[in-house]
Image (cartoon, grey):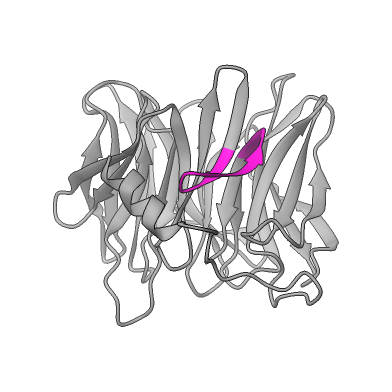
Amino acid sequence: MDLFIRASILSSGALVLATASPALAAAGGPPIAYVVVSGGTNDLYLSNSDGTGKVKLYSSGNKVGIIHVDIRPGGNQLAIIEQSVAGGLGTLKIINYSDAGARQSVTTVDSGASCYVNGADYHPTDGSLLVSRHCPPSTVEVVRYSGGAYDSTPLASFNGDVFGGKVRWINDGSGFLWVVGDSGGGGHIDHYDLSNTAAPVTVWSSGSYSVPNWFDVQRCGPSQTCDRMLVTTPGGEVHEVSFSGGGSDLRTLYTNAGSDAHYSPDNAHVLWRQQLRNGTNVMIDNTIFVKGGGSKDWRQ
């Protein structure tokens, strides 16, 4: 309940958010990207947080879903993961666009023979992508993608009965958080320090074999401490969790079939998806932003 009170204060009257004038393109393009299902395709839009400046950036192929969106800090580029109803899993694409949101190029990333991508996140400063991928029959790994190629050596990897899901850099780029599921520890999120990736620390556990489908990490200025993340539990709740030390579940933010929550650039607002009986809403705090929206991101 505390978030609903906090959100009501933050959003009283009208949402007071940093937005660009619809008459003037903001550097990096509109800051929010979101997906809307349109017949058999998925349409990807860019928009300001007050709904102005809306432009369609990309449409998927028929019966192809966009299951993940991540905008590069500073904008003008984003990464998506597509999944086909026909069985095509985890295809990573990179889309470049102008400040006005006009698409300039779409690049399909070769992630390796039979490999598919489960998660991708831009580095806070250097523009590289952190990618979680599965390469059959049994390899799951986190590896950097930069300059049009994957690094030859992964940052972390497993072989065997392990699932590797979403992945996120922490604020200063000194480490990352990775969703892992295995028969021994169930579903959990592990914190990897780049200085010692062989010794990850579990900072959140689902309490079952189910893994969280989404999570997002705070991003702050160099003098600030960012140690929180928004986790979607397997049961459809959004929790705010500290990943310091061994981690701690701080509070439940949304219980009404909430999922895929993202912090605003100043960490004062939350962009999330509300599941309804007959569809979905993309919400900013407790206000409907888009009816029928799916995957999304809010540029840092």
Tell me the quarter of the picture where residue 10 sits: bottom left
The kind of secondary structure the magenta stretch mainly shows is strand
From the image, which quarter does the N terminus lie in?
top left
Quadrant of the rendered structure where residue 113 is? Answer: top right
Give the percent coordinates (x, y) of residue 51: 69, 56
**Left or right: 297 as drawn, with respect to 197:** right
What x and y, as percent, mark residue 16? Answer: 52, 66
Horizontal placement of 64 versus 187: left or right? right
Q: Residue at x 29, y 56 (%)?
A: 228
Q: Which residue is outermost to the left?
A: 246
Q: Is residue 79 above or below residue 233?
A: below
Q: Is residue 99 left or right of residue 14?
A: right
Residue 155 visible to the viewer: no
Q: Is residue 122 magenta?
A: no
> Viewer-proximal residue, 297 or 4?
4
Q: Pick whichever, 82 or 279, lies toward us.
A: 279
Q: Position of residue 92 (x, y in %)?
A: 66, 45
Image coords of residue 291 (percent x, y): 66, 36
Q: Is 238 drawn above or below residue 161 in the view shown?
A: below
Give the extent of the magenta segment: 282-294
Which residue corresponds to the image point at 81% horizontal and 69% vertical from the top-left? 100
Q: Residue furthest bottom?
A: 223
Name the residue rendered at 35%, 81% in the picture. Answer: 222
Query: From what the image shows, is residue 102 above or below residue 224?
Result: above
